[in-house]
Amino acid sequence: MEVTCNRCHQVVPTDSCYCPTCGLPQIVYTSEDGSAAATGEPSTGAVRDASTVEWKPALRVALIVSVPAAVIWLVSSGSSPQTAILSPLWMAAAATWAVTLYARKQRPAWITMGAGARIGLVTGILSGWFAFIVLSAALWAERFLLGQSKQLDEPMLAKVGEASQQLQQMSPDAQTLAAWKSFTGWLLTADGRAGSTLIGLLLLEIALVVFATAGGAIGARLMARSRRPGA
């Protein structure tokens, strides 16, 4: 006889005491002689749906993890090209850690990949905000307090010059060349430099969120496989 979950009505394996979809315990009552069995209505008061997120503890865990994760990301991305390549993995690992800390105190002690992805998303957003604030403050201090505007602008000027030389070698038409000169002229203004910096920071935020979301989903999947009864 096929047994279904009392909450989500999905099929539950006969050898499992938990629903593989929502995590609800499946309590079975048997007669003394074992000749009959019936599925009873379980108590759901203290049992959490594995696909939902209790945001108060989740936000607390995300706050605890996001700040050191952003600091590690900033240090690793600015230290060397080798570590900069691996720096996005730190954010994914931080989201996995946040999901692990959250799920340990839940009942059942695992969550679905969707719930893990949402926790990872929040962790990535908080880490991105922290990194955004730190980088913005550092750039402002270097440019206006320390007077290092020339040192900050030299890499951009060099890249613009290289791109212009490559474009000249391609023999573009007059319209393309005029559009390029207009764009580079704007890019080298104060508004252009500020806009390019802002775009770079926003791309950084998006990258952190994407990797953190993926890390949260992966962390939930790993925990489900290791902790879910009957998995």
Image: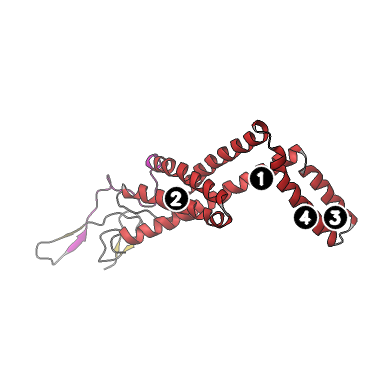
Per the image, the residue denoted by label 1 is 199
> Mark 1 or mark 2: which comes first in sequence?
2
Per the image, the residue denoted by label 2 is 94
Depth check: give the residue in front, 22 or 53: 53
Query: What is the spatial separation of the Cα atoms under label 4 and label 2, in whole angstroms?
Result: 38 Å
Query: What is the spatial separation of the Cα atoms under label 3 and label 4, in whole angstroms?
Result: 17 Å
Tell me the residue at 53%/55% (across/down): 83
Q: How is the image coloured?
A: secondary structure
Q: Amino acid at mark 2?
A: Ala
Depth check: give the residue in front, 157 or 68: 157
Q: Position of residue 224 (x, y in %)?
A: 35, 58
Dots 3, 4 in contact, CB < 8 A: no
> Mark 4 or mark 2: which comes first in sequence?
2
Q: Amino acid at mark 4?
A: Glu
Per the image, the residue denoted by label 4 is 162
In the rendered image, residue 226 lying in the magenta stretch gets the answer no
Query: What is the spatial separation of the Cα atoms under label 3 and label 2, in whole angstroms?
Result: 45 Å
Tell me the residue at 38%/59% (across/down): 222
Dots 3, 2 in contact, CB < 8 A: no
Q: Amino acid at mark 3?
A: Thr
* One can see residue 10 in this view: no
Q: In the rendered view, would you say 116 is above or below 169?
A: above
- Which residues are drawn in magenta? 37-57
Q: Amino acid at mark 1?
A: Ile
> Mark 3 or mark 2: which comes first in sequence?
2
In the image: residue 74, left or right of residue 112: right
Per the image, the residue denoted by label 3 is 176
Q: Position of residue 172 (x, y in %)?
A: 86, 59
- From the image, state whether disc 3 or disc 4 is nearer to you: 4
